[in-house]
Image (cartoon, rainbow, N blue to C red):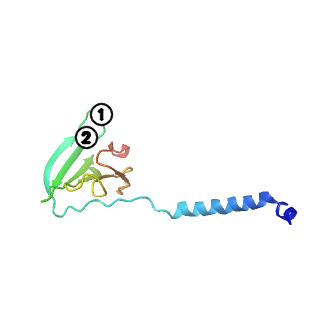
Amino acid sequence: MNATNNKHPSSGISLLTAILMVSLTGLSQVAPAAQFTPPDLEGFNLHDERDADGDGDGKNETRIRQYLNANGDSLASFTSNERLWAWSLDTRDSDIGPKNYVIRDSDCDGTFDEVYGLDDEFHVPECVK
């Protein structure tokens, strides 16, 4: 019986490898890209509007609009060359967690596909420059 099982050991490994490759290929085609929803401005009022250096090159190419609500929560939008490329939310009641974030549209397709913490470094996407 052992002779029969060991007769073609590599064929079993090849079959398992092929099944695994097909399974993984199917997963990569089905998995959607990450998408983050822009924040709702309801209850927020424009507090400040200014130009800033969004990519560290010394030029103030990014228009930042800061909105505040009655709780003191802050929303900020980041726009360069008339294209909105990021939103930031900073809540007063929580220094960490899912309520505090920056979302960024990395390729200017209108979908916010990257998320950062408030202390993380992020820059103007190349497609906006």
Secondary structure found at label 1: loop
Q: Closest to the observer: 124 or 2?
A: 2
The quarter of the rendered structure image containing the N terminus is bottom right
Q: At 24% from the left edge and 55% from the top edge, which residue is drawn?
A: 94
Q: Name the quadrant of the C terminus.
A: top left
The amino acid at mark 1 is Asp
* Image coordinates for residue 113, horizontal then vertical, percent: 38, 55
Quadrant housing residue 36: bottom left
Query: Which mark, residue 57?
Result: 1
Indicate which disc residue 126 carries.
none
Q: Is residue 4 left or right of residue 79?
A: right
Which residue is at 83% across, 60% downward?
6
Instruction: Return the residue at label 2.
Output: 61
Amino acid residing under circle 2:
Glu
Residue that protrudes farthest toward the front in the picture: 2
Q: Position of residue 77 (x, y in %)?
A: 24, 51
Disc 2 + disc 1, Cβ < 8 Å: yes
Give the crowd class for mark 1: few <14, some 14-19, many >=20 residues within 10 Å: few
The extreme bottom residue here reads: 1
Image coordinates of residue 3 in percent, x first then y, are 87, 62
Look at 29% across and 59% down and name the residue there: 38
Task: Label 2: state its secondary structure.
Answer: loop
Using the numbered discs, state the Cα–Cα distance from disc 2 to disc 1 in whole angstroms.
9 Å
Residue 31 appears left or right of 67: right
Taking depth in this image into account, of 79 and 18 the one nearest to the observer is: 18
Q: Position of residue 25 (x, y in %)?
A: 59, 60
Of circles 2 and 1, the one toward us is 1
